[in-house]
């Protein structure tokens, strides 16, 4: 256990970071594979040590293992730690499933030239003013298991 960024807590603290593949549907959230992530400072040459792996590297390996289980995988979803890894995007493209990757606010991604490339650019392109004048926002009705809905 070591001091490192723990996304679940939203802060740096003592803990173990793992990379995990999870199979889920409307009823079940089931971990398939997991591997601990060892921070760079544990290696003799830090990030430049040949044994060091960024989180996307073992994640790509686990995604391939998940595919080998025979469970259908339609979509891969990740947090923004993966949005800066070309290796991760290439591994996803080779594995074949659709994917969605959270972007850091200023990190850009591919888009047609006339479209926003960062989350901030996307937000600025909308006509949002406030809750009474949402502009381009579209209401979405969510249906919950207990039967209630929210807009």
Image (cartoon, grey):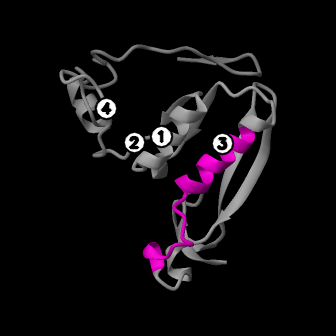
N-term mark: 3 or 2: 3
Q: Distance of mark 4 from mark 1, alpha carbons?
A: 14 Å
Residue 32, percent from left and from top: 79, 45
The residue shown at (45%, 73%) is 47
Mark 3–mark 4 distance (CA, rounded to whole Å) = 22 Å
Q: Residues within 10 Å of mark 2 (few under 14, many from 20)?
A: some
Q: How many angstroms separate mark 3 from mark 2 (CA)?
A: 20 Å
Q: Looking at this view, is 124 or 64 the one in front?
A: 64
Q: Which residue is mark 2?
A: 103
Crowding near the residue tagged with mark 3, few <14, some 14–19, many ≥20 C-alpha atoms within 10 Å: many
Q: What whole-number distance in Å separates the C-alpha atoms at marks 2 and 1? A: 17 Å
Report which residue position mark 4 lands on.
110
Residue 8 inside the magenta-drawn segment: no
The percent coordinates of residue 61 (x first, y second) are 64, 49
Marks 2,4: beta carbons within 8 A? no
Front-lying residue, 83 or 49: 49
Range of residues picked out in magenta: 46-66
Q: Is residue 84 left or right of residue 13?
A: left
The structure residue drawn at horizontal position 60% and vertical position 34%, both measured from the top left corner, is 95
Numbered disc 1: secondary structure: helix
The residue under label 3 is 63
């Amino acid at each position: 256990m070591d001091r490192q960024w723990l996304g679940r807590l939203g802060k740096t603290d003592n803990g173990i970071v793992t990379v995990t593949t999870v199979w889920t549907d409307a009823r079940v959230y089931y971990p398939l594979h997991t591997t601990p992530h060892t921070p760079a400072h544990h290696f003799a040459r830090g990030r430049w040590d040949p044994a060091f792996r960024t989180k996307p590297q073992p994640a790509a390996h686990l995604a391939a293992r998940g595919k080998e289980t025979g469970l259908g995988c339609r979509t891969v979803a990740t947090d923004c730690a993966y949005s800066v890894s070309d290796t991760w995007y290439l591994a996803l493209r080779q594995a074949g499933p659709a994917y969605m990757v959270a972007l850091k606010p200023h990190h850009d991604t591919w888009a047609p030239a006339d479209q926003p490339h960062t989350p901030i650019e996307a937000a600025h392109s909308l006509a949002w003013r406030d809750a009474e004048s949402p502009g381009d926002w579209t209401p979405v009705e969510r249906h919950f298991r207990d039967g209630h809905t929210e807009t």
